[in-house]
Amino acid sequence: MEGNSVSLNTYVKTNQQEDIKWYFNDIRIAEISGDLSDICTDVQCEDGDERFRDRLMLDHQTGSLTITNTRTTDSGLYELKLISSSSISEKIFDVTVYGVPATEKDQKSVKKGQSVTFDPGVVRKPSDVMRWYFNEILIAEITGYQSNICEDEQCKERFRDRLKLDHQTGSLTITNTRTTDTGLYELKLSSSSLRRFSSAVSVKRIGVTVNSGLSSGAVTGIVVGVVVILLLVV
Protein backbone atom coordinates (compact mmCIF):
# COMPACT_ATOMS: atom_id res chain seq x y z
CA MET A 1 0.00 0.00 0.00
CA GLU A 2 1.06 3.58 -0.67
CA GLY A 3 3.10 4.93 2.24
CA ASN A 4 4.38 1.51 3.34
CA SER A 5 7.96 0.28 2.95
CA VAL A 6 9.12 -2.59 0.75
CA SER A 7 12.42 -4.49 0.89
CA LEU A 8 14.04 -6.13 -2.13
CA ASN A 9 16.44 -8.79 -0.83
CA THR A 10 19.62 -10.00 -2.51
CA TYR A 11 20.17 -13.06 -0.26
CA VAL A 12 23.94 -12.62 -0.66
CA LYS A 13 26.82 -10.97 1.22
CA THR A 14 28.42 -7.83 -0.17
CA ASN A 15 31.95 -9.09 0.53
CA GLN A 16 31.31 -12.00 -1.82
CA GLN A 17 30.56 -9.69 -4.76
CA GLU A 18 32.56 -7.09 -6.64
CA ASP A 19 29.50 -4.95 -7.26
CA ILE A 20 25.78 -4.96 -6.49
CA LYS A 21 23.75 -2.66 -8.71
CA TRP A 22 20.04 -1.77 -8.61
CA TYR A 23 18.07 -0.38 -11.56
CA PHE A 24 14.53 0.97 -11.87
CA ASN A 25 13.20 1.15 -15.41
CA ASP A 26 16.83 0.89 -16.64
CA ILE A 27 17.98 3.81 -14.44
CA ARG A 28 20.66 2.97 -11.88
CA ILE A 29 19.29 3.91 -8.45
CA ALA A 30 21.75 2.20 -6.08
CA GLU A 31 25.16 0.54 -6.06
CA ILE A 32 27.52 -0.94 -3.49
CA SER A 33 30.93 -2.58 -3.93
CA GLY A 34 32.22 -5.52 -1.92
CA ASP A 35 34.86 -3.42 -0.15
CA LEU A 36 32.31 -0.61 0.46
CA SER A 37 34.51 1.85 -1.41
CA ASP A 38 31.71 2.69 -3.83
CA ILE A 39 28.23 3.29 -2.39
CA CYS A 40 25.46 5.41 -3.87
CA THR A 41 21.68 5.72 -3.81
CA ASP A 42 19.37 7.71 -6.06
CA VAL A 43 20.73 11.24 -6.69
CA GLN A 44 24.21 10.16 -5.54
CA CYS A 45 24.39 7.74 -8.47
CA GLU A 46 25.48 9.04 -11.85
CA ASP A 47 22.19 8.09 -13.51
CA GLY A 48 19.94 8.95 -10.55
CA ASP A 49 17.21 11.56 -10.45
CA GLU A 50 14.93 13.04 -7.80
CA ARG A 51 12.39 10.22 -7.84
CA PHE A 52 13.54 8.43 -4.68
CA ARG A 53 15.19 11.29 -2.78
CA ASP A 54 15.67 10.32 0.91
CA ARG A 55 13.55 7.17 0.42
CA LEU A 56 16.16 4.50 -0.38
CA MET A 57 18.01 2.48 2.26
CA LEU A 58 20.86 0.19 1.20
CA ASP A 59 21.97 -2.62 3.53
CA HIS A 60 25.77 -2.54 3.67
CA GLN A 61 25.98 -6.20 4.65
CA THR A 62 23.76 -7.71 1.96
CA GLY A 63 23.12 -4.96 -0.58
CA SER A 64 19.37 -5.38 -0.10
CA LEU A 65 17.35 -2.31 -1.01
CA THR A 66 14.45 -0.84 0.98
CA ILE A 67 12.09 1.77 -0.43
CA THR A 68 10.35 3.83 2.27
CA ASN A 69 7.20 5.95 1.99
CA THR A 70 6.25 4.22 -1.27
CA ARG A 71 4.26 5.98 -3.96
CA THR A 72 2.16 4.59 -6.78
CA THR A 73 4.79 5.94 -9.19
CA ASP A 74 7.29 3.49 -7.63
CA SER A 75 5.44 0.65 -9.37
CA GLY A 76 7.51 -1.08 -12.00
CA LEU A 77 10.43 -3.43 -12.63
CA TYR A 78 13.49 -3.35 -10.38
CA GLU A 79 16.58 -5.10 -11.72
CA LEU A 80 19.36 -6.43 -9.49
CA LYS A 81 22.79 -7.18 -10.94
CA LEU A 82 25.23 -9.24 -8.87
CA ILE A 83 28.74 -8.94 -10.27
CA SER A 84 31.54 -11.21 -9.07
CA SER A 85 34.97 -12.01 -10.45
CA SER A 86 33.63 -15.03 -12.32
CA SER A 87 30.03 -14.25 -13.22
CA ILE A 88 27.16 -11.78 -13.51
CA SER A 89 23.69 -12.76 -12.35
CA GLU A 90 20.43 -10.84 -12.53
CA LYS A 91 17.13 -10.80 -10.68
CA ILE A 92 13.93 -8.96 -11.55
CA PHE A 93 11.43 -7.68 -8.96
CA ASP A 94 7.97 -6.64 -10.15
CA VAL A 95 6.62 -4.10 -7.62
CA THR A 96 3.08 -2.74 -7.52
CA VAL A 97 2.15 0.03 -5.09
CA TYR A 98 -1.58 0.41 -4.51
CA GLY A 99 -2.97 3.84 -3.68
CA VAL A 100 -4.87 4.42 -0.45
CA PRO A 101 -8.50 5.34 -1.35
CA ALA A 102 -9.27 9.01 -0.77
CA THR A 103 -12.13 7.99 1.52
CA GLU A 104 -9.60 6.37 3.86
CA LYS A 105 -6.94 9.08 3.84
CA ASP A 106 -6.96 12.78 4.69
CA GLN A 107 -4.56 15.13 2.96
CA LYS A 108 -2.70 18.00 4.60
CA SER A 109 -0.29 20.48 3.05
CA VAL A 110 1.81 22.86 5.14
CA LYS A 111 4.69 25.24 4.65
CA LYS A 112 8.10 24.28 6.00
CA GLY A 113 8.48 25.59 9.57
CA GLN A 114 4.77 25.60 10.33
CA SER A 115 3.02 23.22 12.74
CA VAL A 116 0.51 20.55 11.81
CA THR A 117 -1.92 18.73 14.12
CA PHE A 118 -3.55 15.35 13.56
CA ASP A 119 -6.95 14.83 15.16
CA PRO A 120 -7.82 11.17 15.87
CA GLY A 121 -11.47 11.77 15.00
CA VAL A 122 -12.54 9.40 17.79
CA VAL A 123 -13.18 9.79 21.50
CA ARG A 124 -10.41 8.12 23.47
CA LYS A 125 -11.33 5.88 26.39
CA PRO A 126 -8.95 5.28 29.35
CA SER A 127 -8.49 1.64 28.33
CA ASP A 128 -7.69 2.45 24.70
CA VAL A 129 -4.20 2.11 23.26
CA MET A 130 -3.40 4.67 20.57
CA ARG A 131 -0.33 4.43 18.38
CA TRP A 132 0.80 6.94 15.76
CA TYR A 133 3.04 5.75 12.91
CA PHE A 134 5.05 7.60 10.28
CA ASN A 135 5.85 5.42 7.26
CA GLU A 136 5.38 2.35 9.49
CA ILE A 137 7.72 3.73 12.20
CA LEU A 138 6.10 4.05 15.65
CA ILE A 139 6.49 7.68 16.72
CA ALA A 140 4.00 8.13 19.59
CA GLU A 141 1.91 5.93 21.88
CA ILE A 142 -0.69 6.33 24.61
CA THR A 143 -1.32 3.36 26.89
CA GLY A 144 -3.66 3.89 29.82
CA TYR A 145 -2.23 6.82 31.75
CA GLN A 146 1.19 6.69 30.12
CA SER A 147 2.41 8.23 26.89
CA ASN A 148 5.65 7.79 24.99
CA ILE A 149 7.18 9.70 22.11
CA CYS A 150 9.97 8.41 19.88
CA GLU A 151 11.37 5.41 21.73
CA ASP A 152 13.90 4.34 19.06
CA GLU A 153 16.92 6.27 17.79
CA GLN A 154 15.65 6.65 14.22
CA CYS A 155 12.53 8.41 15.45
CA LYS A 156 14.45 10.58 17.94
CA GLU A 157 16.82 11.71 15.24
CA ARG A 158 14.04 12.61 12.79
CA PHE A 159 11.56 14.30 15.15
CA ARG A 160 13.83 15.47 18.00
CA ASP A 161 11.77 17.68 20.38
CA ARG A 162 9.21 18.41 17.64
CA LEU A 163 6.33 16.06 18.59
CA LYS A 164 3.57 17.04 21.03
CA LEU A 165 1.04 14.43 22.13
CA ASP A 166 -2.27 15.34 23.80
CA HIS A 167 -2.83 12.62 26.38
CA GLN A 168 -6.53 13.41 26.74
CA THR A 169 -7.55 13.40 23.08
CA GLY A 170 -4.71 11.47 21.44
CA SER A 171 -4.08 14.27 18.93
CA LEU A 172 -0.52 14.64 17.65
CA THR A 173 1.23 17.89 16.69
CA ILE A 174 4.45 18.28 14.72
CA THR A 175 6.16 21.62 15.26
CA ASN A 176 8.73 23.30 13.01
CA THR A 177 7.93 20.95 10.13
CA ARG A 178 10.59 19.89 7.62
CA THR A 179 10.31 18.60 4.06
CA THR A 180 11.45 15.18 5.37
CA ASP A 181 8.22 15.05 7.41
CA THR A 182 6.34 14.47 4.15
CA GLY A 183 4.70 11.04 4.09
CA LEU A 184 1.88 8.90 5.42
CA TYR A 185 0.84 9.13 9.07
CA GLU A 186 -1.40 6.45 10.51
CA LEU A 187 -3.27 6.10 13.80
CA LYS A 188 -3.96 2.60 15.08
CA LEU A 189 -6.42 2.04 17.91
CA SER A 190 -6.67 -0.97 20.20
CA SER A 191 -9.57 -1.02 22.63
CA SER A 192 -11.36 -3.61 24.75
CA SER A 193 -14.29 -3.61 22.32
CA LEU A 194 -12.02 -4.28 19.33
CA ARG A 195 -9.50 -6.75 20.76
CA ARG A 196 -11.74 -9.77 20.24
CA PHE A 197 -11.58 -9.05 16.49
CA SER A 198 -8.12 -7.56 16.00
CA SER A 199 -5.14 -6.40 18.00
CA ALA A 200 -5.27 -3.00 16.32
CA VAL A 201 -7.51 -1.22 13.84
CA SER A 202 -6.39 1.65 11.66
CA VAL A 203 -8.77 4.53 12.24
CA LYS A 204 -6.91 7.37 10.55
CA ARG A 205 -4.55 7.79 7.61
CA ILE A 206 -3.18 11.24 6.84
CA GLY A 207 -1.00 12.07 3.87
CA VAL A 208 1.17 15.09 4.62
CA THR A 209 3.13 17.27 2.22
CA VAL A 210 5.57 19.82 3.64
CA ASN A 211 6.42 22.42 1.01
CA SER A 212 9.74 24.24 1.10
CA GLY A 213 10.09 27.93 0.35
CA LEU A 214 8.67 31.09 1.82
CA SER A 215 5.05 31.37 2.84
CA SER A 216 2.90 34.06 1.25
CA GLY A 217 3.02 36.00 4.54
CA ALA A 218 6.81 35.98 4.56
CA VAL A 219 6.94 37.15 0.95
CA THR A 220 4.49 39.96 1.71
CA GLY A 221 6.61 41.01 4.69
CA ILE A 222 9.72 41.17 2.54
CA VAL A 223 7.95 43.24 -0.12
CA VAL A 224 6.64 45.69 2.49
CA GLY A 225 10.12 45.95 4.00
CA VAL A 226 11.62 46.82 0.60
CA VAL A 227 8.97 49.49 0.00
CA VAL A 228 9.69 51.09 3.39
CA ILE A 229 13.43 51.16 2.67
CA LEU A 230 12.85 52.75 -0.74
CA LEU A 231 10.62 55.41 0.81
CA LEU A 232 13.29 56.23 3.38
CA VAL A 233 15.88 56.56 0.63
CA VAL A 234 13.62 58.93 -1.33
Image (cartoon, rainbow, N blue to C red):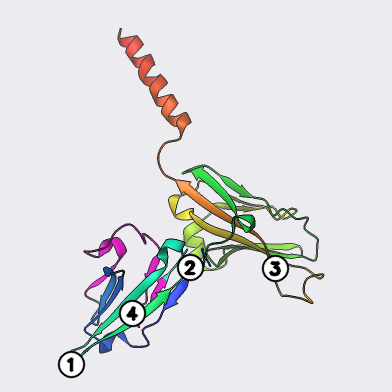
Q: CA distance from mark 4 to mark 3?
A: 34 Å
Residue indicated by mark 1: 86
Q: Which mark is residue 97?
A: 2
Q: Nearer the viewer, residue 130 or 186?
A: 186
Observer able to see residue 173: yes
Q: Is residue 233 above or below residue 64?
A: above
Is residue 64 a member of the stretch shown in magenta? Answer: yes
Q: Secondary structure at mark 3?
A: strand
Amino acid type at mark 1: Ser
Q: Say left or right for 230 vs 113.
A: left
The 10 Å Cα crowd at callout 3, few under 14, some 14 to 19, many 20 or more, is: some
Q: How packed is label 4: few (under 14 Cα within 10 Å), some, or many (20 or more)?
A: many
Which residues make up the magenta segment?
Answer: 37-66
Q: Quadrant of residue 186?
A: bottom right
Residue lying at 48% horizontally and 29% vertically, measured from the top left: 217
Mark sitting on residue 63:
4
Mark toward the start of the polypeptide (4 vs 1) = 4
Circle 2: residue type: Val
Q: Is residue 175 visible?
A: no
In this view, the mark in front (2 or 3): 2
Q: CA distance from mark 2 to mark 1?
A: 36 Å
Mark closer to the chain start, 2 or 3: 2
Do the CB atoms of the residues marked 2 and 1 lie less than 8 Å apart? no
- The residue beneath circle 3 is 201
Closer to us: 86 or 151: 86
Kind of element beneath mark 2 = loop
- Residue 116: assigned label: none
Residue 41 x, y percent position in the rendering? 30, 67
Name the kind of residue labelled 3 in the image. Answer: Val
Q: Are marks 4 and 3 in contact (CB under 8 Å)?
A: no
- Quarter of the image with the C terminus in it: top left
